[in-house]
Amino acid sequence: YEVELADGKIVSTNNVLKGCTLNLLNPSFLIDLMVIELGSFDVVIEMDWLSKNDAAILCGKKKLKELSKKGFIRPSSSLWGAQVLFVKKKDGSFRMCIDYQELNKLTIKNKYPLPRIDDLFDQLQGLSVYSKIDLRSGYHQLRIREEDIPIIAFRIRYGHYEFQVMPFGLTNAPAV
């Protein structure tokens, strides 16, 4: 069996686990699983199976539209392209997770890490004005240099995009 991954790479396997039970919310389905090393993903359900079983996946398009409208992402023609996974949150909404493991392996780690928070507070000793500007939604605010933008591109079934702001999951990115 051969499978095309989101990055266009073809992987093959002869190992198929037949008659596995897949539980999605309430209904259970019998499926055959192909064993393929995918890095951080446990299971990937193919789109043909989802459409055959009338599954609706709308979160991806909605999230892309949100990010694009805010100017966080744009369409890309980069040769790079990390895989994307949507993870369900406790409130029922979905979080878009981009697998930057391969890019992180190639990244030169910071020689000078960010200062520790207790050291920063020591430097502020004696000051009387503190700000909590945008602590509630402080992510996606750090702009990326134009020449670095193509490196953090990602592929999703709706297209190929790249962040213009710092996404989560990159080595050397501050924990924003």
Image (spheres, helix red, strand yellow):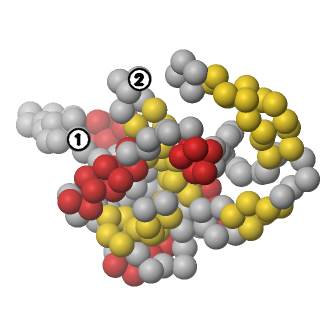
The reply, left or right, for residue 3 in relation to residue 163 is right
Q: How far apart are marks 1 and 2 (CA)?
A: 19 Å
Q: Residues within 10 Å of mark 1 (few under 14, many from 20)?
A: few
User: Which residue shows up at 25% across the image and 53% down it?
Assistant: 66
Residue 69 position, x and y percent, is 20, 60
Question: Where residue 46 sits in the image (x, y, percent)?
Answer: 63, 49
Frontmost residue, 68 versus 166: 68
Location of residue 72 by image quarter: bottom left
Amino acid type of the residue that numbered disc 2 sits on in the rendered structure: Lys
Asked if one can make out residue 113 in the rendered structure from this viewpoint, the answer is no
Residue 138 position by quadrant: top left
* Residue at the top extreme, as displayed: 26
At horizontal 26% and vertical 61% (from top left) the residue drawn is 68
Above or below: residue 37 compared with residue 56: below
The one of 144 and 51 positioned closer to us in this rendering: 51
Closer to the camera in the image, 38 or 163:
38
Amino acid type shown at disc 1: Ser
User: Which of the labelled discs sits on residue 137, or is there none?
Assistant: 1
Residue placed under numbered mark 2 in the picture: 90
> In front: mark 1 or mark 2?
2
Looking at the rendered structure, the secondary structure element under dot 2 is: loop
Say if 130 sits above or below 107 in the image.
above
Q: Which residue is drawn at 58% across and 51% down?
A: 47
**Is residue 137 in view from this perspective?**
yes
